[in-house]
Structures are given as C-alpha cells and as structure tokens.
C-alpha cells in the first residue's frame, strides 16, 4: 500500500469540506471506456483496470458521493488479481438535497444520512438497474454472473448492497465499505426473488466515522442477517478510522476477493 498514491475526495454538506486520503503512487493500465458501450450508460465513461492474463472474473466497484471511479481504480490496482477485471463506473451528476441541491456525482439523491431519513426510492431503483446492466454486459461477454463481485464505498457501497439483494442472478459476493442498506424497511420482502440469499458479504466500517456512524453500520449488519445467510456475513470495524479506507481494510478486501473469485 505504501507504493501508491491515491487522492480520494468526498464532499458533504454537513462540513462543507473534503476528506482527502493519500496513499503513495503507482502506474497501472487504466482504461477509460469513453465512447464505448453506449447501450450501457454507466460503462460509457467507466474506468477499468484490465487483467494481466485471461479475464475470468470481474469486480464492479462504485465510488461515494462527489467522487469518481478514478480513485478507486487506483485502489483496485494496488490489490488486483491477474485474472480479474475491475470496473469503476462514474456516477451521473445530479442535484443532491443533502448538499443544498448542489450538482455533483451521485448514484441517487440523498436527503440525509440517518436510518430514518427520507429516501429517493425511484432513484435508488433506477441506479440499481443501471448496475445490473453492467452485470448483464459482462455475462454477454463471457464472464458468468457468479464470477462477478459488486463493491462500493459509502453511497456506492449502499447501492452495491441494494443491487445485489434485488438481483435475480447469483453473484460472487459484495464488498460494502462504510455504508448502509438503502430502503432497509422494504427488506427482507424486497429480496424475495433474489438469487443472493446465500451470498458472501464483507462489510467494513471505521469506528470513528463522523459521516456514517459505525452504529449505523452495525444496524445494517443486523438487518442483513435476516436477509442473507448470517454465516456468510463478515462485519469488520477499524479503530481510529474515519470516513475513509485504510491499508488493513484494503488487505481484507483483497483477501475476500481472492476467496470469492479464485483463478479457474
């Protein structure tokens, strides 16, 4: 982790500031999908990290509010496996209620960051369908759904959880960092047709997170236990970690991806 440099900015109305994470520097084979795959909106400008051998699996990782796919593409490069393709889409720019209607990259509108905040149900469902379109695209190109793993940070982690739990295709797993389950009151009913009731989930959260308190993460973990096989859920917390990632967390992410997407 010391050999790369990543600047990961996150915008929030509550403080009006950016949290910046700097983690070293490394070159990598990033590829922008600009102009390609126009039938799949999120792939039009997605950043991908290609495998160094035949790609037999894919990780789709969704960034947080106000961010872009580039920073997390750097993070995926640092932990990548040679047979895995990493796809880091960019969220559309929309007005965000939480940030005084400022326009910024956001998967769906956010009204608040507490369990009882109103939610953008239509926007969440629309965003989930757009992520499922990426999964379908990978399947059409030869990577089966059970070799596709979803992940994300903050709002992106929230969307990855919701997408997987409402997806009929069986996926390899979910990495959910510093996040929550959107539309949590609709579950477990919303997952009744899901192919992922037995899906492995790695959920990680910083114990000093001022944006999404770790207690919210713990509540999410308890909710997930009544939706999926609780033995397949791992909830890890990191002392001193705020609304960010750390080398120990990324090592856990790498270990999880290696286990769920082994070389075949």
Image: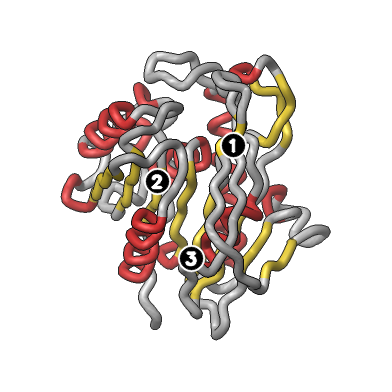
Q: Which mark is residue 29?
A: none
For the residue pair 23 and 231, the one nearer the viewer reads as: 23
Q: Secondary structure at mark 3?
A: loop
Asked whether residue 190 is in view, the answer is yes
Q: CA distance from mark 1 to mark 3?
A: 21 Å
Q: CA distance from mark 2 to mark 3?
A: 23 Å
Asked whether the residues under the numbered discs 2 and 3 touch, taking CB atoms below 8 Å apart as contact, a structural biologist would say no
Which badge, 1 or 3, is on the more N-terminal residue?
3
Residue at 53% x, 57% y is 23
Residue 122 rendering spot, x and y as whole percentages: 58, 25
* In the rendered image, the vertical position of residue 207 relative to residue 73, given as above or below: above
Q: CA distance from mark 2 to mark 1?
A: 17 Å
Q: Residues within 10 Å of mark 2 (few under 14, many from 20)?
A: many
Q: Residues within 10 Å of mark 1 (few under 14, many from 20)?
A: many
Asked whether residue 163 is in view, the answer is no
Residue at 69% x, 56% y is 46
Q: Nearer the viewer, mark 2 or mark 3?
A: 3
Q: Secondary structure at mark 2?
A: strand
Q: List the residue tagged with mark 3.
A: 2
Which badge, 2 or 3, is on the more N-terminal residue?
3
Residue at the outermost right position: 35
Q: Is residue 103 left or right of residue 128?
A: right
Residue 237 rendering spot, x and y as whole percentages: 28, 43
Which badge, 2 or 1, is on the more N-terminal residue?
1
Q: List the residue tagged with mark 2.
A: 176
Asked whether the residues under the numbered discs 1 and 3 touch, taking CB atoms below 8 Å apart as contact, a structural biologist would say no
Residue at 61% x, 73% y is 50
Q: List the residue tagged with mark 1.
A: 10
């Amino acid at each position: 982790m010391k050999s790369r440099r990543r600047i990961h900015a996150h915008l929030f109305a509550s403080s009006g500031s950016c949290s910046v994470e700097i983690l070293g520097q490394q070159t990598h084979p990033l590829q922008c999908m600009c102009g390609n795959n126009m039938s799949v909106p999120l792939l039009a400008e997605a950043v991908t990290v290609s495998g160094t051998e035949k790609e037999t699996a894919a990780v789709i990782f969704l960034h947080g509010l106000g961010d872009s796919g580039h920073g997390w593409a750097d993070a995926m490069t640092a932990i990548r496996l040679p047979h895995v393709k990493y796809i880091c889409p960019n969220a559309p720019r929309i007005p965000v209620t939480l940030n005084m209607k400022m326009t910024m990259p956001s998967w769906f509108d956010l009204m608040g960051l507490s369990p009882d905040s109103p939610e953008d149900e239509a926007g969440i469902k629309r965003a989930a369908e757009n992520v499922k379109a990426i999964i379908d695209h990978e399947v059409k190109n030869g990577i089966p759904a059970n070799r596709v793993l979803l992940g994300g940070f903050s709002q992106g982690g929230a969307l990855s959880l919701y997408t997987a739990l409402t997806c009929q295709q069986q996926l390899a797993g979910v990495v959910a960092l510093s996040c929550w389950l959107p539309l949590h009151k609709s579950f477990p009913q919303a997952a009744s047709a899901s192919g992922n009731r037995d899906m492995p989930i790695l959920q990680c959260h910083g114990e000093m997170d001022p944006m999404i308190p770790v207690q919210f993460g713990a509540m999410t973990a308890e909710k997930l236990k009544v939706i999926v096989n609780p033995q397949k859920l791992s909830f890890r917390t990191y002392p001193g970690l705020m609304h960010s990632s750390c080398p120990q967390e990324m090592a856990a992410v790498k270990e999880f991806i290696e286990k769920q997407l082994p070389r075949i």
